[in-house]
């Protein structure tokens, strides 16, 4: 991953196309994968992600082609806040407040259950969020 200006750029390979989208497969490799000791270490890992790019504003692409996918870095920060920051804040604040009124175990279960409506809200607003978090293909 590289950051150029105000964008986060990753290299991927076009997996397939449909009428509306281009699907790009990106392999994220941990830093351990490039380590010289990776053969004797069990912590190295890699994950594949399939990114969806709107085809209307993208250049022509074909399956198997290597492309660079970019996203505004502010959107990346917002994604981290929505996916990790807010749930953490909800969990900690509710846990601290509820331990004053009930046992720790019940407060913990209730705090975790408060995350269900939060993630349900993210799910219901996914189409609006999808428009906010747009990926583009660089030429």
Image (cartoon, helix red, strand yellow):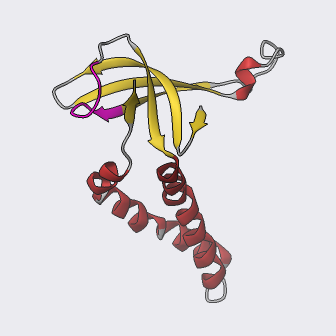
Give percent across and percent down for residue 9. 52, 33
> Residue 106 or 13: which is nearer the viewer?
13
Quadrant occupied by the N terminus: top right
Residue 54 is inside the magenta segment: yes
Residue at image position (32%, 49%) is 130
Q: Is residue 51 left or right of residue 33?
A: left
Q: Position of residue 58 (x, y in %)?
A: 29, 29
- Residue at 58% x, 77% y is 94
Determine the residue positioned at 72% across, 27% down. Answer: 31
User: Which quadrant would residue 40 be assigned to in this image?
Assistant: top right
| Apparent side of residue 58 relative to residue 85 in the rendered image (left or right) | left
Give the farthest residue toward the bottom.
Answer: 101
On screen, residue 104 above or below 68: below
Q: Which residues are magenta?
A: 52-60
Residue farthest left in this picture:
19
Q: Is residue 85 above or below residue 133?
A: below
Nearer to us in this view, 91 or 133: 133
| Majority SS type along the magenta span | loop
């Amino acid at each position: 991953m590289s950051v150029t200006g105000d964008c986060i750029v990753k290299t991927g390979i076009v997996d397939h196309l449909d009428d509306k989208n281009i699907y790009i497969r990106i392999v994220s490799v941990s830093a351990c994968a490039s380590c010289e000791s990776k053969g004797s270490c069990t912590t190295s890992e890699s994950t594949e992600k399939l990114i969806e790019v709107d085809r209307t504003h993208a250049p022509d692409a074909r399956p198997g082609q290597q492309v660079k996918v970019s996203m505004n870095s502010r959107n990346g920060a917002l994604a981290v806040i929505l996916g990790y920051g807010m749930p953490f804040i909800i969990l900690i604040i509710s846990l601290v407040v509820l331990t004053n009124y009930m046992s720790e175990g019940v407060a913990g279960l209730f705090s975790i259950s408060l995350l269900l409506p939060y993630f349900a809200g993210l799910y219901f607003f996914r189409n609006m969020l999808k428009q906010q978090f747009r990926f583009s293909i660089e030429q």
